[in-house]
Amino acid sequence: TAALCLPHSFPRLTPFKLVDSPAVWIAICLIVAAAINLGGTRAYGEMEFWFAIVKVLTIISLIILGIILDAGGGPDHDVIGFRFWMSPGPFVQYLGIPGVTGRFLGYWAVLIQASFSYIGYVPFNYPCSD
């Protein structure tokens, strides 16, 4: 769970050996979640609102950071957004297969790989589980 990652992500928050235990972090997260749920509808709704605001701000800031890094705003100032636009070009031959067939297979291979990156393999597990 996420509670197991807390001691490794924030080592300065664990000055004592007792807090270094994963069981303590899991208990703390469970107590916080239970307190939010037992606080009533108003407290739960308020926490849900602020968590949603944090989530939206995180997504927006990561999109802006990605654009800045692609445009050369990183520490090495390398513009990586259109690095391969001219050489070798957008349609490269796949596995050295010449002609239109090789370029189509290159496009198809990238399309399949990108679709797995976006949707993952979970939709393919549903038919297998039946």
Image (tube, rainbow, N blue to C red):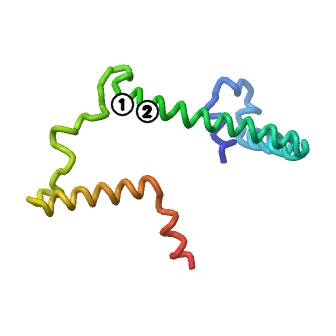
Q: Residues within 10 Å of mark 1 (few under 14, many from 20)?
A: some
Please name the residue shown 18% across and 43% down the image: 89
- From the top left corner, tell me how far across and down residue 75 is, in percent: 37, 20
Q: Quadrant of residue 36?
A: top right
Residue 128 at x, y percent in the picture: 51, 76
Question: Is the Cβ of the residue at disc 1 closer than 8 Å to that at disc 2?
Answer: yes
Cα–Cα span, label 1 and label 2? 6 Å
Image x and y of residue 20, in percent:
70, 34
Q: Quadrant of the rendered structure where residue 113 is?
A: bottom left
Q: How many marks?
A: 2
| Horizontal relation, residue 68 to residue 80: left or right | right
Q: Residues within 10 Å of mark 2 (few under 14, many from 20)?
A: some
In terms of secondary structure, where does tag 2 sit?
Answer: helix
Q: Amino acid at mark 1?
A: Asp
Considering the numbered disc 1 on the image, is that residue within a helix, a strand or a loop? helix
- Residue at image mark 1: 70
Residue sitting at x 91%, y 44%: 40
Residue 21 x/y as whole percent = 72, 38
- Quadrant of the image for the C terminus? bottom right
| Closer to the camera in the image, 39 or 60 | 60
Q: Amino acid at mark 2?
A: Gly
The residue drawn where x is 51% and y is 33% is 62
Which of the pair 113/82 is nearer the observer?
82
Query: What residue occupies the far left of the structure in this picture?
Result: 98
- What numbered label is drawn on residue 121? none
- The reply, left or right, for residue 64 in relation to residue 112 is right
Q: Which residue is denoted by mark 2 in the rendering?
A: 66
